[in-house]
Amino acid sequence: MPAIYLDCNATTPLDPEVREVLLYYYGDGYGNEGSRTHEFGTRAKQAVQKARDQIAAVVAAQRDEIIFTSGATESNNLAILGLAEAGKAQGKRHLVTTTIEHKAVLEPFAKLELDGFEVTRLPVSSCGYVEPELVMAALRPDTLLLSIMQVNNETGIKQHISEIAEMLVDHPVFFHTDAAQGFCKDLDTLKNHRIDLISVSGHKIHAPMGVGALVVRRRGYERPPIHALAYGGGQERGIRPGTLPVALIAALGKAAEVAVRDNVKQRESCKVFRDRALVALMPFNPKFTGNQSRVMEHVLNISFGELDSEALIVQLKDLIAISNGSACTSSSYTPSHVLKAMGMSDDEANSCVRISWCHMTPEVDWDAVAERIKRLI
């Protein structure tokens, strides 16, 4: 039998309802959303507008505040680099983020640093999150942007986004969150209107790879002054040019709709799976990464003493497919910058594995998994 896929933080399987929508618009429902002279274009435009409404409903936004992109990486770049011109014009060249962000956030900040911006990178404790008071202490009158992820992709730990948003009421800083791991899962957080910019990834919520969104929320009548990073068309309010991938966008909208509709049921399914996993793994006295009271139901980041993660992954590869870090940096074979930021040594970081699942994950033979681990310890 094939191994059971337990790497859903890297990507998720396609939902059957989403697949149906995707195939329809790749087949009989084709059309260019920008074509205004016939029904094929009208139908495509209606599909895109419906998807905007479906995405907007998740975060209590308006249809015209949704910008479709190729995924969270592009959304992060657009949110961060897209504010640079406004920052220069306003004399606001200070930026704040954390040391545990995804590379799709850290690298755009590094680019702006080379362009003369000053970046404050906030530390985290072994708990895996940044303290809200530390965030507020870092803000200055010339701070342009604050970017903190909603849920960490390696540890599954939720950051204090709601608390920080409430503290920002009297500060003009733009607040961005990379919500790739929390969108459609941790629902209430993103509805806070003090969060100006939200990055969304389709393939983390059972939609296809290659599509995502950036929520650009207005304050009153003014939207964040995001400038385009590419040129060649007036699509997406001139912020993100290019022909819209209607099938991908419609599929993303459907995935969001299904995820919200079934949120309670899906999260409960993940809790049950987690409980079964822990029953099998607890006899080996695993060390849990970070504050477990803030971990999402579908993620375990753990280690077993000094057992090397690569050895464990190889030993289990025909039973379960797991990882030891972000899929975007796994080819580098260097200790996780997230785990290092949490105070781990190289050896400790290299011992950690990430197990992540979803409501579609089949049953695992945990007895067989336990037997394999026993051979290594």
Image: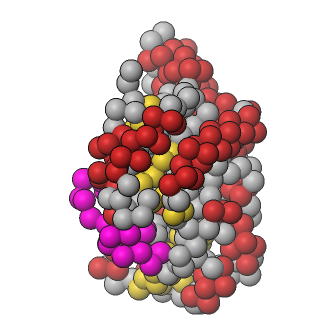
Q: Is residue 87 left or right of residue 291?
A: left
Image-quadrant location for residue 146: bottom right
The answer to whether any part of residue 264 appears in the image is: yes
- Above or below, 45 against 223 in this view is above
Quadrant where the image shows the C terminus: bottom left
Q: Is residue 338 magenta?
A: yes
* Residue 94 x, y percent position in the rendering: 47, 84
Q: Which quadrant of the figure contains the N terminus?
A: top left
Q: Nearer the viewer, residue 223 or 180?
A: 180
Residue 4 coordinates in the image, percent (x, y): 44, 31
**First to last magenta residue range:** 329-349
Q: Nearer the viewer, residue 169 or 40?
A: 169
Q: Residue at x 56, y 44 (%)?
A: 280
Q: Residue 223: x and y, percent?
A: 62, 62
Membership of 290 in magenta stretch: no
The residue shown at (51%, 63%) is 287
In this picture, residue 325 sits left or right of residue 98: left
Name the residue located 64 percent from the left edge and 49 percent from the top edge: 297
